[in-house]
């Protein structure tokens, strides 16, 4: 993995960190694998007969699947920056369902920067991570906060 | 899956929805499966030599793994309530790392209720989902918002 | 996992223990997983060209797949009863083949009770486990014997 | 897969069909994979903390795992005989638990032959399938009944 | 696994070691597994939208998938010969792409024998391993060299 | 996936294309997964009891596992170059065994260039792909030939 050493000061709100990752077509296998891995066998994802009676008509992927796959696409498109560490997510939404055959692509933009409540050596920098399908519909949106080293600590 | 039909009015802030799910011991396999499934092969999870040089000393699980496994544990401990639909998460944190051999358990509590900004038929009800390890340390905390049918619509 | 503490005396022949578990649609992935996991790559499950020449015309799932999936559906619909322990199966049949797209559901009924040949503290209680597809055809039937604690030992 | 064409008349009670299959060491991965595939996340197989409080002290494999792996070992050691078709199992027992590191081997012996209740063209021939660990302890025993073509139909 | 003990002297160039293994139908699952296992998520295998713009029009399997599956088919059709040890491959080609639904079969022929450059106790014997699809098109061809014990060492 | 458009003329013998990919620690899970995926359950990889009697003393990974993982590490460290297409491998060797806990890293160097026997628009350019473990021992070496577009066709 290539390394980059960007500091808190190097990120600007509005920066496009990744315009477009590689894309991945979601398959029925991915859905089964996600159910298996998580243990989440909710009928929305695994019971075709019940799904036929629902507005969405067929099995839809777990929101978390889009989240995990989107995360992987972003990781594969990123260099490793030892100056940042994941702090958590402030928002996670699944605006549009995913079905087998949908092809997902992610993009990343800097959407927020703020001081860390306690540490002067680090700031909190937020990535807006958007995962879209082949029609451009957003299937997952996450606000990913990073604990980020400052080049120059606050005093 | 058993069904229950609780309405927005039936949830009270502070209610313990699930006190303790079943528990699941995380294995090295789960970590490899998560890397495989997501495509996230970050060295923190998969490069033991590099990890030895880091403060955490050994490979640690993906935060998303704790999130997905915690979600599965909760689903397996829940009845299906057709009156609620996942709206997203307002906060997601991984306060403590997970390593193979850790045993995770989840609990769920109602932590918030508010009107839906537009719909009079539904409210937004939030679950605080906490995943702890065998020592009681919190490894994942998620605020899961549900779009929830009201028994009686607002007027 | 919730617990229940039913004793041998609490089970009656004819009792419906589980009327209907959740359902799970079997996919081609499940069939491939089962071949991979077991190492059973018989042409009935994995060689479409050969299957075309057979009465069943296409790849059919392993009987053991229906058995394992049925067992999982039952486990997910059950509370854990520390008073019972699996003793084995007295009959296992696969009356109808399963193909991808079939949706399986299980039910459980008490079909037999008898003294344990040696132990006065336990009896043998048998569940009839039936797995059906979306048309109601039985795809797996198992007689599952449980070594079950008596509230009051025989004297 | 090589073919053989043995008929009902060719099997003798007491025949050793397979003396010793290849062996397979069971791993923690196999156990996780079996839980994932079946959806059976019972604490006996997946909750190390709870298992420590039990007589068996550590996570033990699903009985069905030994059954599926044993079946695969037998299939890999067999030629395909188009004259036999699985009819089901008349007994299935798991006398000894399996833990990661155990190495399983199977053997097969003809233990019963009888007329089919209705068909004169076929008989019912039963294999005793025994799966043992590296110490020779039996971990799975199955009586596998085959619907078997007669060279000469009964009249 | 059955054993055979053929020596270097027992192999003749032109010998058909395996005429036809069992066959295996490749599925979309196999393709996803291979991407997951290897970490090779190239768009040729996983991005349907991009593939539509390419000459091959749809996702095609990794060449290495055909190689691995072909190897497995050969292993399952072989007895174990402790006198041979894999030395490597001298050629590996993927002349024809594989898509889900293709059914692969392998065959093995002795294509070369030569002295080992240093050891008098062993020779180098080469298998031509051919994997074909259901139309007879070659999808993988490998020249597999084996370090092979001589019955009588050279002097 | 980022794109680069290097032509045949842009590659020089001796060029280091990738000095060091990310690293991946091989686990027992990876070995089980490779057996499952390929169907290659040779005792060298899966029978610990037999392995104890062999010079290598414990289960060793499939050579093809190192090859597939090495390929994935290279793909993840590469931009996509639409001007090159895999033509096959001219040599594949597994000089050193891999056991769980080994950490693999790959590197890529241009080792050969030659005219295509028939096409004037393309040349054949060969990558030497080396996969090493944490001690620097080579566990897989492959000569990967690419059919590569010339900027200026030969006349």
Image (spheres, coloured by chain):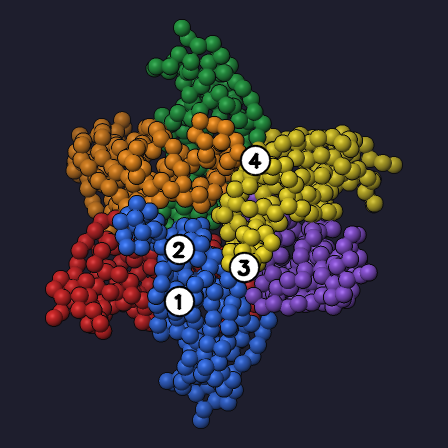
Chain colours: A purple, B yellow, C green, D orange, E red, F blue
Question: Is label 1 or label 4 in front?
Answer: 1
Q: Chain of mark 1?
A: F
Q: The C terminus of chain B lies in which quarter of the figure?
A: top right
Distance (Cα) linking label 4 and label 3: 30 Å
Query: Would you name the residue on which mark 4 appears?
Result: B23
Give neighbour class at mark 3: few <14, some 14-19, many 20+ (Cα, 10 Å). some
Distance (Cα) linking label 1 and label 4: 42 Å
Give neighbour class at mark 1: few <14, some 14-19, many 20+ (Cα, 10 Å). many
Q: The N terminus of chain B lies in which quarter of the figure?
A: top right
Query: Would you name the residue on which mark 3 appears?
Result: B50
Question: Is label 3 or label 2 in front?
Answer: 3
Depicted B6 relative to depicted A124: above or below: above
**Mark with earlier residue (4, 3):** 4
Query: Would you name the residue on which mark 1 appears?
Result: F138
- Dot 4 falls on a residue whose secondary structure is strand
- Dot 3 falls on a residue whose secondary structure is helix
Give neighbour class at mark 4: few <14, some 14-19, many 20+ (Cα, 10 Å). many
| Residue at 60%, 37% in the rendered image | B135
Q: Chain of mark 2?
A: F
Query: Would you name the residue on which mark 2 appears?
Result: F99
Give neighbour class at mark 2: few <14, some 14-19, many 20+ (Cα, 10 Å). many
Residue F116 x %, y %: 40, 84
In the rendered image, which quarter is residue D98 located in? top left
């Amino acid at each position: 993995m290539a390394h980059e050493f960007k500091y808190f000061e190097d990120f600007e709100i509005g920066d496009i960190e990744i315009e477009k990752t590689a894309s991945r077509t979601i398959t029925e296998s991915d859905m089964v694998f996600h159910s298996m891995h998580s243990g989440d066998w909710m009928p929305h994802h695994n019971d075709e007969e019940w799904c036929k009676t629902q507005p969405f008509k067929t099995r839809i992927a777990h929101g978390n699947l889009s989240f995990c796959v989107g995360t992987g696409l972003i990781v594969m498109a990123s260099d490793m920056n030892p100056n940042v560490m994941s702090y958590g997510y402030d928002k996670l939404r699944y605006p549009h369902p995913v079905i087998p055959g949908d092809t997902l692509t992610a993009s990343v933009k800097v959407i927020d920067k703020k001081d860390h409540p306690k540490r002067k050596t680090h700031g909190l920098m937020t990535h807006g991570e958007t995962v879209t399908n082949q029609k451009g519909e957003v299937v997952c949106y996450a606000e990913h906060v990073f604990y980020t080293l400052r080049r120059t600590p606050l005093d």
